Amino acid sequence: QVQPVESGGGLVQAGGSLRLACEASGSIFRRNDMAWYRQAPGKQRELVASLSANGARNYADSVKGRFTVARTSNGYTVFLQMYNLKPEDTGIYYCNILGAWGPGTQVTVSS
């Protein structure tokens, strides 16, 4: 059973950076597609970025040019590097792979 776990969230000022990590057992990220989602207070969960098994990356328009998704060569961890953070990036960030959700990590960007 897959159980991803996110980490790396925190409080940062606008313009700052954070790097989130999603970890799961086995080389699962090397063999399967995955995605990062976020949910802001009072809003629906939305797709932020995805990384396919073959390395293709896609980003929501709102984060293009500011966020980068990458995985380790051993496939155990996927990172979401976030630059130039904005208050509207605030929310709980979730990792999803094979239909399994992690518990999420809170990102708060102050203005």
Image (cartoon, rainbow, N blue to C red):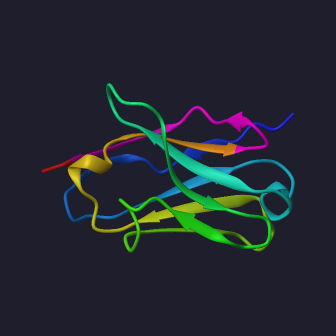
Q: Would you identify the image quadrant in which residue 74 lies? A: bottom right
Q: Residue at x 56, y 50 (%)?
A: 36
Instruction: Report the span colored magenta.
Output: 97-109
User: In the image, 67: left or right of 71?
Assistant: left
**Front in this rendered view, residue 39 or 10:** 39
For the image, the number of numbered tags is 0
User: In the image, 9: left or right of 86?
Assistant: right
Residue 104 highlighted magenta (yes or no): yes
Vertical side of 95 occupied by 83: above or below: below
- Which percent across, then down, holds residue 7? 53, 47
Chief secondary structure of the magenta portion: strand
Toward the left, the furthest residue is: 111
Q: Residue at x 82, y 48 (%)?
A: 25
Toward the top, the furthest residue is: 42
**Front in this rendered view, residue 60 or 10:** 60
- Which percent across, then down, holds residue 40? 35, 35
Toward the front, the furthest residue is: 61
Residue 23 highlighted magenta (yes or no): no
User: In the image, 59: left or right of 76?
Assistant: left
Q: Residue at x 69, y 50 (%)?
A: 23
- Which percent across, then down, holds residue 15? 21, 65
Q: Would you identify the image quadrant in which residue 101 lies? A: top right
**Front in this rendered view, residue 56 or 29:** 56
Q: Residue at x 78, y 64 (%)?
A: 75
- Which percent across, then down, holds residue 57? 62, 69
Vertical side of 43 occupied by 31: above or below: below
Quarter holding the N terminus is top right
User: In the image, 111: left or right of 18?
Assistant: left
